[in-house]
Image (tube, grey):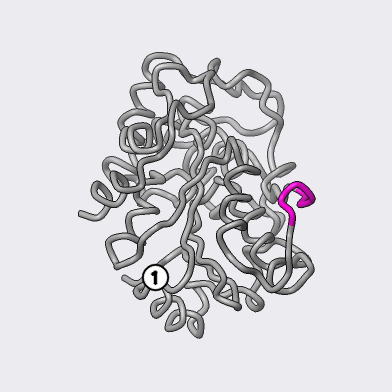
């Protein structure tokens, strides 16, 4: 299994377990800058050099050695499940991707046909999102009509692979308090190039892919929608202290207990 979704600076100053839709573009660029004194020119997900990634075969041995010996500070970042699934919908389902095409080719036509989703023109965002949510639940719970996509599979699932295969996190922080969390990470490591989080632009690579959200977060979630979200993300709400009862409250209700995370996700 190894360590899928794991990135490490070439200097091995830090190790990061990517969780999609949780500031991963900005974190990756900070890691790249901290080694090279410049940001990667383009989407950091496309970088094939300057950053060790599990997806690059030559990086796997170095990442495995580092993670299994806890050779570097290891961290990740999480986000409110309500805003994360909304972001996935507007970016991946409604948006045109950076290659100029729809995400995953025939995915959107499938959703239009089987779930009645609309993504063109002045469509009903709330109705289409709720139908997408039904599809996302089907993929997560029943793996039909396909396996769940990384952008809407549970954060706890992403984080658990790192633990199960022998890794241990030193920090998991919140997207909602990004600067404070990332500053704590950088304060705990020594990097070849100093970097101040407050000076870093936000690399929101999905921004502009899709239509702007026309309603507040809570408008998208009725009782049934909340039930579907809980079906998919109950462990995320519990472990990362987010407020399931109130979709309008994006902030966590407390700090993450790393011992609890390792105990419950290390099974």
- Near-viewer residue (113 or 173): 173
Point out the stretch of residues depicted in magenta. 196-201
User: Does residue 193 appear left or right of residue 65 in this picture?
Assistant: right
**Label 1 SS:** loop
> What quarter of the picture does the C terminus occupy?
bottom left
The vertical placement of 182 against 45, above or below, is above
Q: Quadrant of residue 137?
A: top left
- Near-viewer residue (105 or 259): 259
Q: Residue at x 36, y 75 (%)?
A: 69
In the image, is residue 251 part of the stretch drawn in magenta?
no
User: Does residue 26 appear left or right of residue 189 in this picture?
Assistant: right
- Near-viewer residue (182 or 86): 182
The picture places residue 237, in percent across and down from the top left corner, at 37, 32
The picture places residue 165, in percent across and down from the top left corner, at 29, 67
Q: Quadrant of residue 31?
A: bottom right
Residue holding disc 1: 70
Q: Give the number of marks.
A: 1
Q: Residue at x 52, y 78 (%)?
A: 56
The picture places residue 233, in percent across and down from the top left corner, at 36, 35
The vertical placement of 132 against 199, above or below, is above
In the image, is residue 200 part of the stretch drawn in magenta?
yes
Q: Quadrant of residue 67?
A: bottom left
Classed neighbour count for the residue bearing mark 1: other residues with Cα under 10 Å, few (<14), some (14–19), many (≥20): some
The picture places residue 68, in percent across and down from the top left corner, at 34, 73
User: Does residue 43 appear left or right of residue 176 in this picture?
Assistant: right
> What quarter of the picture does the N terminus occupy?
bottom left
């Amino acid at each position: 299994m190894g360590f899928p979704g794991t990135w490490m600076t070439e200097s091995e100053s830090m190790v990061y377990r990517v969780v999609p839709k949780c500031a991963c573009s900005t974190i990756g660029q900070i890691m790249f800058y901290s080694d090279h004194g410049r940001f990667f020119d383009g989407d950091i997900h496309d970088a094939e050099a300057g950053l060790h990634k599990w997806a690059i075969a030559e990086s796997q041995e170095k990442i495995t050695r580092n993670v299994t010996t806890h050779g570097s500070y290891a961290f990740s970042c999480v986000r409110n499940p309500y805003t994360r699934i909304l972001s996935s919908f507007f970016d991946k389902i409604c948006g045109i991707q950076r290659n100029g095409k729809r995400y995953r080719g025939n995915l959107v036509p499938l959703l239009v046909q089987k779930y009645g989703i609309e993504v063109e023109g002045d469509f009903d965002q709330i109705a289409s999102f709720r139908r997408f949510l039904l599809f996302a639940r089907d993929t997560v719970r029943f793996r039909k009509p396909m396996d769940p996509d990384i952008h809407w599979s549970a954060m706890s699932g992403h984080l658990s692979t790192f633990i199960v295969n022998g890794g241990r996190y030193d920090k998991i922080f919140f997207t909602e308090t990004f600067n404070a969390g990332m500053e704590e990470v950088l304060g705990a490591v020594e990097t070849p190039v100093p970097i101040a989080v407050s000076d870093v632009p936000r690399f929101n690579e999905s921004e502009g892919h899709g239509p702007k959200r026309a309603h507040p977060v809570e408008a998208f979630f009725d009782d049934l929608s909340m039930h579907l979200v809980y079906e998919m993300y109950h462990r995320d709400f519990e472990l990362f202290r987010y407020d399931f009862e109130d979709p309008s409250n994006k902030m966590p209700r407390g700090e993450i207990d790393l011992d609890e995370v390792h105990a419950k996700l290390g099974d």
